Amino acid sequence: IWFKKDDMVQKLWDLGARADIPNKYGETADEKWQAERERYERMVFLDLEWSREPKKIMEVAMLITAKNMTEIERGRWVIGGLSKAVLEAQPEFHQEHYRDAEPGGEFPPLPGKPGNGLFSDVLKSWVTKTEVERAMVKLLLNHCPEKACPLVGYSIQNDKELLMTEMHVFYSHVSHQIVDLSTVLRLGANFVPNKMKKREIGPSKYNHRAMHDVEETIEGLVWIRDNLFLPDIPSA
């Protein structure tokens, strides 16, 4: 399709073609070209929660935004298939965070450490990894061109490495590029420490449920954009 080919668009412009004349559907060439370019600028915020022994994905959250981080569509899935015995055998971090918030369920919390309930949700889920991957691919390709949009997150390379082995079909559809907020913040601390002082550092808000962590990541990238990349506006 011509409007997906930059060289074709440029050639038409060079020849003096009118790109602002609507077709019978009311669409102009300029509008269709701009809409296609915007698809390439979108970002895929993603977070995985996974078990360690064995290393399996338990929960996925995915949220696609425009380049200004306006939400376009989101999805969240809990994958079943791990037994109670396997979940009980997970290491200390998992026991602290993924058990129930209150006593009385399948996974009562450790003393003084209410969990987020993910273990119980995994035990109740009948959704398979294949079904989740299929839904993720559909969500991605509804809004992003093939292999064009980067994954975004804190230390997102860890999630992408797991996707390579656990969800290779989805992995093959995303861009080879990533946007790692941890790296950007580290560079900010090195190169613009005065700007980094504006960042309030307190207890982590992450609750290790995938969609909550995705939303926190978007807030983090908004802060980076507004404080590290946009110029300071002098006060009046």
Image (cartoon, grey):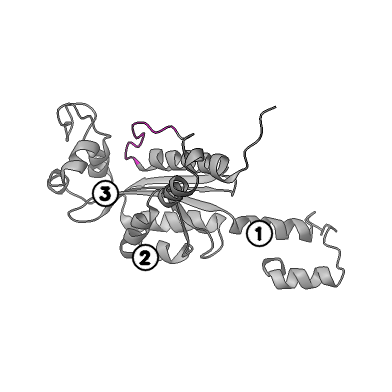
Return the residue at label 3. 80
**Residue toward you, 64 or 133:** 64
Quadrant of res 136: bottom left
Examine the rendering and report whether any part of residue 1 can be seen: no
Between 110 and 223, the residue placed more toward the observer is 223
Return the residue at label 2.
168
Taking depth in this image into account, of 118 and 148 the one nearest to the observer is: 148
Q: Label 3 amino acid?
A: Gly
* Mark 3: few/some/many CA within 10 Å (<14, 14-19, 20+): many
Could you tell me if the residues under marks 2 and 3 are in contact, i.e. CB atoms within 8 Å? no
Q: Is residue 85 left or right of residue 113?
A: left
Cα separation, mark 1 vs mark 3, equals: 38 Å
- Residues drawn in magenta: 200-209
- The N terminus is located in which quarter? bottom right
| Amino acid residing under circle 1 | Arg
Instruction: Indicate the secondary structure of the residue bearing disc 1.
Output: helix
Q: Residue at x 67, y 67 (%)?
A: 4
Above-or-below relation of 120 to 10: above
Q: From the image, tell me which residue sits under label 1.
A: 37
Other residues around mark 2 within 10 Å, as few (<14) / some (14–19) / many (≥20): some
Whether tag 2 and tag 1 are in contact, CB under 8 A, the answer is no
Q: Secondary structure at mark 3?
A: loop
